[in-house]
Image (tube, rainbow, N blue to C red):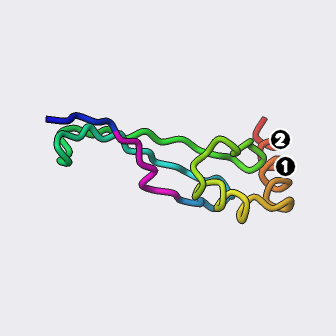
């Protein structure tokens, strides 16, 4: 009987303002079958450092977080503050 813990980025979404929402699943596996699982979500905003993210998240952020998107996001945040 082998019990393992797996971390899987199972959902990546880009929302209108350019933020990238990431859902990570933590699965507890016993002999290849999931016996428990939880989810964690976090957001990578335009301009954030995403170098420690999953490779797929990095690729999406690189394509999405253009200079124009980052500037628009920062301007919108300044208007809110």
Q: Is residue 38 left or right of residue 81?
A: left
At a point 66% along the width and 61% down the height, the residue shown is: 59
- How far apart marks 2 and 1 lie (CA) works out to 5 Å
Q: Name the residue tied to disc 2.
A: 78
Q: How many numbered marks have been drawn onto this rendered protein structure? A: 2
Residue 65 horizontal/vertical position (percent)? 75, 58
At a point 53% along the width and 59% down the height, the residue shown is: 13
Q: Which segment is the magenta one?
A: 6-12
Depth check: give the residue in front, 24 or 16. Answer: 24
The answer to whether the residues at label 2 and label 1 have Cβ atoms under 8 Å apart is yes
Label 1: which secondary element:
helix
Depth check: give the residue in front, 29 or 61. Answer: 29
State whether residue 61 is above or below residue 39. below
State whether residue 64 is above or below residue 79. below
Q: Name the residue tied to disc 1.
A: 75
Main SS, magenta residues: strand
Residue 1 horizontal/vertical position (percent)? 13, 35
């Amino acid at each position: 009987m082998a019990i393992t813990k797996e971390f899987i980025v199972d959902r990546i979404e880009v929302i209108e303002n350019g933020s990238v929402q990431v859902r990570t699943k933590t699965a507890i596996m016993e002999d290849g079958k999931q016996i428990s699982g939880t989810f964690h979500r976090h957001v990578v905003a335009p301009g954030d450092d995403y170098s420690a993210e999953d490779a797929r998240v990095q690729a999406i952020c690189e394509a999405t977080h253009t200079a124009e998107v980052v500037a628009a996001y920062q301007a919108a945040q300044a208007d809110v503050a």
